[in-house]
Amino acid sequence: MSATVVTGISELVTNDPARERGLLGILEDAALVIDGGRVGWIGPGSAAPDADERVELDGQTLLPGFVDSHSHLVFAGDRSAEFVARMTGTPYDGGGIAVTREATCAASDEQLRALVQARVAEMAALGTTTVEIKSGYGLTVEQEARALRIAAEFTGETTYLGAHVVPPEYHADRAAYVQLCAGEMLEACAPHARWVDVFCEPNSRYAFTEDEARHILSAGKQHGLLVRVHGNQLGPGPGVQVAVDLGAASVDHCTYLSDADVAALAGSDTVATLLPGVEFSTRSPYPDVRRLIDAGVAVALASDCNPGTCNSSSMPLMVALAVREMGMTPEEAVYAATAGSARALRREDVGTVRLGTSVDDLAVLTAPSHRHLAYRPGMPIAHRLSDAVRLS
């Protein structure tokens, strides 16, 4: 396989602050060599070595592909009416998941596979190179396992979320559904999952209490699954503490945090994954990200692409919202959407540009700087490098 030198890089975002300057470790007027499908050299354009082929980026930006560490892509149906109702004042409480469940269970494997394939392609077209996909719209043993089998065709980052909500047929016996999630359903789903997750949200009658969440997550750990948690979305609650206590890689949403929550996160390896598309789509308060960053908490950004509370998979949009609505700097937001989200998946092979990085994990901006992600919101300027240019 021949080597290719990529030159004309206005900004090379490495996410290695030791390399050059700032949080993003930016190299200006840079070049890199791709050899055998991986980065084999990084440095100034003036020192670029000879190679079999040359690709000229003409002043564009090269960066790690976005890592979307929270998505719900295995679904069918439409909930646009629910979105319109929220825009006129109806609050979100998690109940709409039942609508998606009905449509998803009615869809064939082929229909669901085609829907997931199209959504993953949408993500890739906007620069996302790594995606996590959850189950959670089947809520039976057979349907949850089916969702994970399909998800696993597109990513290794699959998450068992049978404990998304308590389905209507178990409202009179919540304990039975909790036991199903921690028992037979878990056993059927664990072979197809890397993670276990629970919507720990006492502020919703559909979601799970602290004790229920601990039981299901602990059972998942015993089956070899790693832990993530939906927590503190609709109000103050135990989600953060549950996540920290169980060594979760990430607790996601973090909209309502106490001082104790922030301190617990700061003293742990658990990442706070923020999902600004949800606040945008539900007219909810945005998380206080400055409070987290100032406390030394590791922060990630993800899309939470789902049919109810954020039907967008655009990581560039999440970066723009984080800057405009949450007060992150462009540097902080780009880092959180790449290296931060990689950490939320406990991945060291993505989210950075360094020797050995796969070409499939690189993205390019048709812009001279990473700042344009927030400066030009909604514009399709981000692409996977392998889709934007021809590489041998």
Image (tube, rainbow, N blue to C red):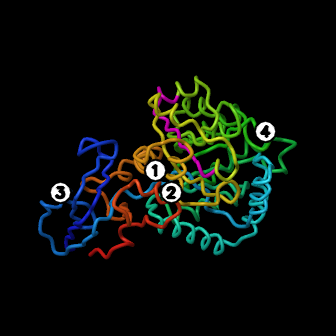
Q: Residue 160, percent across and down? A: 61, 51
Near mark 3 (Cα within 10 A), the count class, few <14, some 14-19 or many ≥20, is: some
Q: Is residue 117 magenta?
A: no
Whether residue 346 is visible: no
What residue is disc 2 on?
315
Q: Which amino acid does label 3 sit on?
A: Pro
What residue is disc 4 on?
175
Near mark 4 (Cα within 10 A), the count class, few <14, some 14-19 or many ≥20, is: few
Sequence order check, earlier mark of 2 and 4 = 4
Mark 2–mark 4 CB contact (< 8 Å):
no
What residue is disc 1 on?
337
Q: Which of 183 and 64 is in front in this view?
A: 64
Q: Specify the quadrant that holds the N terminus.
A: bottom left
The numbered disc on residue 44 is: 3
Q: Is residue 267 magenta?
A: yes
- Residue 192 appears left or right of 4: right
Q: What residue type is labelled 1?
A: Ala
Q: Which of marks 4 and 3 is in front?
A: 3
Reply above or below: 78 against 259. below
Q: What stretch of residues is rendered in magenta? A: 265-278
Sequence order check, earlier mark of 2 and 1 = 2
Q: Residue 315, percent across and down? A: 51, 57
Q: What residue type is labelled 4?
A: Ala
Mark 2–mark 1 CB contact (< 8 Å):
yes
- Residue 214 appears left or right of 59: right
